[in-house]
Image (cartoon, rainbow, N blue to C red):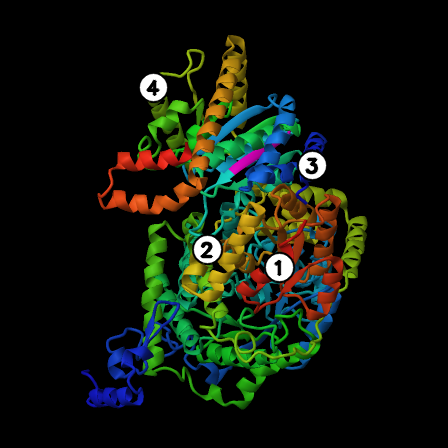
């Protein structure tokens, strides 16, 4: 097709409308490296492989099912879990009665990292960012009166995936449900944990073996169960743009497929049970295109294995709206953001969806905010009439061109990964993590300078923010869990348990199937911590190597007064004190979300601080030791998992005990405003919620550490 | 909490207070003359309490796994009952910005062990500074009772020679398959090595690592050893799997024993003291030069004259130096 006959004329009129600015000034370079023009026409999508295909037929750009939502809409699947199994169970049952269709379980961080609730390292984490599960007894309470042969259950678990999946299997068994009837999904996507979320336990090699053991066991015994949910969501939340998310997620998927094939499995026995999990952000059309591009690429990747079963190359995905896009400021705006993201996910053709609660940048969701979140989907699904047509965006010049753009850009990155020897090797090299962190630092700079608008944060700010209710988890959850653990340990046959745990250790050393060994131990009431330890004896515990980029924040910012004035301040500080201002950034507890500290580290260093980074998962005592030895001026602790009320006062106390009360403490992350006073009273000198410009936080920190004697 | 009373620091260091030890190092590292003056006084008083520790320098090419090695080696020493101080110089200053010091993230166990003290220092790009600061920091750590001091340096630039001139034993870490084995590392570094260890001798890498060991052994044959008592051995180790670590420590002890027996140990330390004095003099002269008000004023113009050929470099240097007289 040649150029549209009126294209020249359009350009003339458009130029006139611009009153002197050139037409090119309307072009937009996205962070993905895709150039967006102000107008797309038929000639822009000529010859693309992804255009003019049909749903349910390869390459599945328009959807894995022929009828898509016209036959059955997406599953409304809200991710939730908190406190004890009993409280979470009550919450689930209420939600199911109110129109939710599937369950998605959030576990607390202690459970993720394979610690029982009585472990000294997890005091601040029990029941906070998810439900505490220590053994099959908790699992049984969690699913009480929820028939596991009828309810599809998705479990976000990667680190302690074996004891948790084993517990679920045994809980079902004791409900009278056999394994072949179990339907649902276990996340079991360990590779992305090394990239972003850090809730791993073991090093990559044994972890990959665990993944293939689970695939093997389930393809034999649980044919309806999704064995891996290959997740890009956490990458997006860590800062990846849509091309990076697509490329890294699919590369992870390819790595799992290769591992399963290496373990001797046929592609068609496991590939149909691989599912995906994408994050949907605020670039509305981009993420619609992302889901379409991802389906195209997955078909291309799996086709190389010559599958016989069409389902093997079909990408099915769950989606979640972006938690990172939520703001603490003017938080009701988050309902609108989530609605847009919900539209983007469904126009992109997701199979199931979680919509976030508007208060999640402030704290844990309340019953009210959870209802609004659920209803966001229900309204779109049942009121907006969007479900009557398959892939309504198909044929849109713009969306088709974007789809093709993502396909091409993602292929380039996947080629790079292939050259490094696959995703596991690429992760070892640090490449994907650095790319994501660079993308995050640049995004932060664009926000801080107002280039990327966020309403209520850097534009149309409120003079006064209204108070918001949040859910608070009482610290008695830990005591309840410990009491339960004691009861279980007193009642069980400890000789049996010991023997079965030994068998897990032996299995880890040799060849057998680890999930099988864990099911046996779980049946005998071995705990999550004990089962994890039994493997740790052989595998060891993984320690992340932290690399950190420099320069990205300042370079995205460019020459700017704000930056120059801060650099001048840090320089003056240095001239007066004899050294640069020095900050220790640390994550305490089992919360592994490190986007915040990485962006802080990069930006602070760019602006003239010396920045110490602590290892992950510190106790307050350990963080204080490091602060003292490095003799920093200030400790910045980031918390996104509700542990702050326990951990921050302990840190300040530990500093005092080391005669270092003049080392200041600032806190960042998700901190409910109601807790600010508590933290200030405990001695914190600054609290920086989501949406705080880094430049603003630096000035605050400098104010706090200048003239300290 | 910068007190002006030297006794407060002296007492604190000798009492092994971590807070005071760290503060004293801050004084040493400070760019303020008043702090440096105070530090000099403190070190002078602490000097009688120093000298007993094993002083170890460790370097390696980027990617050789230095931090992981120090984590494993340090934990090995701690389990043997030693107390270990690690001084790490970080070169990662960004242009116009500060440093990111992430060493401890790779020393997860060692950094939280009570008997270990790790102090990463931003380098601020001044090599002369590394000499003075690291030496003095090492002495303060000795006075605070640490009996093994590890000075970690990056595997690029001249900092190796600097570090080698202040330690008893200089260990160079290598890995197999890091490209052309001998190209990747300067001959100069081999000349100052007291031992070379091929790290990451584990998993699929074992064969390659053993081959690399042979190659380095050959390379050492072509170098004249600095001492007749000691030909630097090449060892294999895996910091990850904790293998070969004990052998490295035994090598250090053997070197020490032999050097004590021949008297070379004392000679070396005495020579290091004299070297130290000279490096301080050089640094002091340089500082005096740059801080001279006339030099500060005239330097840019004179440099420009030299650049465009209107002034000979010899004449320019003579003129600038005359300001300091």
Q: Kindly check if marks 2 and 1 are in contact, taking CB atoms under 8 A apart as contact.
A: no
Task: Specify start and end residues of the magenta stretch as a single range.
Answer: B83-88
> Circle 2 sits in a helix, a strand or a loop, which is it?
helix
Q: Residues within 10 Å of mark 2 (few under 14, many from 20)?
A: many
> Circle 3 sits in a helix, a strand or a loop, which is it?
loop
Q: With B10 as the anchor, is A616 left or right in this view?
A: left
Residue under disc 1 on the same chain as residue under disc 3: no
- Separation of disc 4 and disc 1 at Cα? 57 Å
**Image mark 4: chain:** B
> Circle 1 sits in a helix, a strand or a loop, which is it?
helix
Identify the residue at image location x=22%, y=43%. B309
> Circle 4 sits in a helix, a strand or a loop, which is it?
loop
Q: Nearer the viewer, mark 4 or mark 1?
A: 1
The residue singled out by tag 2 in the image is A433
For the stretch drawn in magenta, the main secondary structure is: strand
The residue singled out by tag 1 in the image is A703
- Separation of disc 3 and disc 4 at Cα? 50 Å
Identify the residue at image location x=73%, y=55%. A649
């Amino acid at each position: 097709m040649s150029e549209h006959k009126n294209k020249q004329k359009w350009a003339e009129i458009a130029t006139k409308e611009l009153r002197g600015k050139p037409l090119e000034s309307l072009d937009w370079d996205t962070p993905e490296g895709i150039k967006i023009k102000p107008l797309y026409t038929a000639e822009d999508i000529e010859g693309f492989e992804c255009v003019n295909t049909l749903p349910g037929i390869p390459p599945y750009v328009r959807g894995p099912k022929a009828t898509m939502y016209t036959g059955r809409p997406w599953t409304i699947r809200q991710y939730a879990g908190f406190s004890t199994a009993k409280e979470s169970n009550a919450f689930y049952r209420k939600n199911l009665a109110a129109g939710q269709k599937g369950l998605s379980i959030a576990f607390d961080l202690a459970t993720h990292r394979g610690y029982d609730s009585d472990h000294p390292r997890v005091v601040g984490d029990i029941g906070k960012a998810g439900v505490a599960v220590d053994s099959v007894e908790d699992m049984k309470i969690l699913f009480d009166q929820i028939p596991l042969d009828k309810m599809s259950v998705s479990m976000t678990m990667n680190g302690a995936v074996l004891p948790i999946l084993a517990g679920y299997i045994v809980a079902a068994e004791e409900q009278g449900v056999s394994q072949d009837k179990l339907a649902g999904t276990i996340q079991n996507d360990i590779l992305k944990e090394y990239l972003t979320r850090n809730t791993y336990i073991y090093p990559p090699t044994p972890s990959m073996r665990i993944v293939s053991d689970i695939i093997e066991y389930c393809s034999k015994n649980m044919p309806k169960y999704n064995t891996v949910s290959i997740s890009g969501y956490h990458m997006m939340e860590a800062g990846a743009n849509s091309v990076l998310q697509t490329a890294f997620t699919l590369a992870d998927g390819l790595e799992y497929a290769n591992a399963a094939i290496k373990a001797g499995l046929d592609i068609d026995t496991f590939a149909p049970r691989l599912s995906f999990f994408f994050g949907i952000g605020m670039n509305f059309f981009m993420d619609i295109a992302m889901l379409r591009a991802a389906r195209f690429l997955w078909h291309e990747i799996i086709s190389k294995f010559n599958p016989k079963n069409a389902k093997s190359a079909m990408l099915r995905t769950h989606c979640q709206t972006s938690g990172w896009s939520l703001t603490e400021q003017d938080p009701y705006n988050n309902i609108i953001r989530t609605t847009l993201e919900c539209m983007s996910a469904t126009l992109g053709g997701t199979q199931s969806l979680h919509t976030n609660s508007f208060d999640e940048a402030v704290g844990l969701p309340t019953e009210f905010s959870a209802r609004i979140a659920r209803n966001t989907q229900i309204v779109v699904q049942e009121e907006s009439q969007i479900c009557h047509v398959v892939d309504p965006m198909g044929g849109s010049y713009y969306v088709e061109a974007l789809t093709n753009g993502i396909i091409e850009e993602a292929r380039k990155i996947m080629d790079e990964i292939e050259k490094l020897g696959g995703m596991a090797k690429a992760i070892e090299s640090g490449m994907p993590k650095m790319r994501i962190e660079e993308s995050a630092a640049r995004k932060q700079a664009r926000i801080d300078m107002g280039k990327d608008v966020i309403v209520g944060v850097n534009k149309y700010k409120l003079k006064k923010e209204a108070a918001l209710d949040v859910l608070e988890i009482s610290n008695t959850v830990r005591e309840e869990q410990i009491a339960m653990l004691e009861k279980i340990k007193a009642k069980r046959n400890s000789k049996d348990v010991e023997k079965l745990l030994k068998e897990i250790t032996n299995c880890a050393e040799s060849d057998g199937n680890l999930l099988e060994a864990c099911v046996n131990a779980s049946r005998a009431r071995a705990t999550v911590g004990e089962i994890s330890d039994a493997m740790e004896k052989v595998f060891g515990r993984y320690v992340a190597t932290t690399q950190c980029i420099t320069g990205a924040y300042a370079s995205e910012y460019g020459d700017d007064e704000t930056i120059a004035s801060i650099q001048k301040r840090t320089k003056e500080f240095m001239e007066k004190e004899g050294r640069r201002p020095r900050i220790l950034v640390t994550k305490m507890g089992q919360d592994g979300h490190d986007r915040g500290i990485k962006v802080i580290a990069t930006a602070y260093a760019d602006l003239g601080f010396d920045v110490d980074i602590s290892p992950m998962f510190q106790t307050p005592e350990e963080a204080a030791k490091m602060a003292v030895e490095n003799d920093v001026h200030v400790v910045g602790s980031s918390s996104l998992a509700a542990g702050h009320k326990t951990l921050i006062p302990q840190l300040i106390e530990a500093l005092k005990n080391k005669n270092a009360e003049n080392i200041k403490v600032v806190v960042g992350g998700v901190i409910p405003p109601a807790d600010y006073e508590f933290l200030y009273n405990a001695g914190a000198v600054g609290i920086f919620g989501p949406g705080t410009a880094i430049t603003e936080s630096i000035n605050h920190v400098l104010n706090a550490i200048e003239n300290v004697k | 909490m910068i007190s002006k009373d030297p006794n407060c620091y002296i007492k604190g260091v000798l009492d092994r207070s971590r807070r005071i030890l760290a503060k004293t190092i801050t004084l040493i590292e400070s760019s303020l003359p008043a702090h440096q003056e105070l530090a000099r006084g403190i070190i002078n008083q602490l000097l009688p309490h120093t000298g007993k520790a094993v002083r170890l320098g460790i370097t390696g090419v980027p990617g050789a796994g230095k931090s992981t090695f120090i984590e494993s080696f340090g934990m090995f020493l701690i389990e043997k009952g030693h107390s270990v101080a690690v001084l790490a110089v970080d070169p990662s200053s960004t242009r116009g910005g500060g440093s990111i010091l992430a060493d401890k993230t790779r020393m997860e166990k060692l950094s939280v062990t009570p008997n270990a003290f790790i102090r990463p220092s931003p380098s601020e790009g001044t090599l002369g500074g590394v000499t003075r600061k690291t030496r003095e920091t090492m002495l303060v750590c000795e006075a605070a009772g640490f009996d093994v001091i590890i000075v970690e340096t990056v595997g690029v630039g001249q900092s190796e020679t600097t570090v080698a001139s202040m330690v008893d034993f200089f260990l160079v870490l290598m890995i197999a398959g890091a490209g052309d084995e001998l190209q990747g590392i300067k001959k100069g570094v081999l000349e100052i090595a007291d031992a070379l260890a091929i790290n990451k001798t584990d998993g699929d890498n074992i064969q390659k690592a053993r081959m690399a060991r042979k190659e380095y052994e050959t390379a050492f044959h072509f170098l004249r050893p600095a001492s007749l008592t000691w030909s630097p051995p090449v060892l294999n180790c895996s910091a990850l799997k904790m293998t070969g670590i004990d052998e490295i420590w035994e090598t250090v002890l053997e070197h020490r024993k032999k050097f004590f027996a021949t008297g070379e140990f004392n000679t070396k330390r005495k020579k290091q003291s004299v070297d130290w004095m000279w490096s301080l003099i050089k640094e002091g002269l340089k500082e005096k030069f740059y801080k001279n008000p006339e030099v500060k004023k005239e330097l840019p113009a004179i440099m420009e004259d030299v650049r465009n050929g209107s002034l000979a470099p010899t004449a320019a240097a003579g003129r600038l130096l005359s300001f300091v007289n």
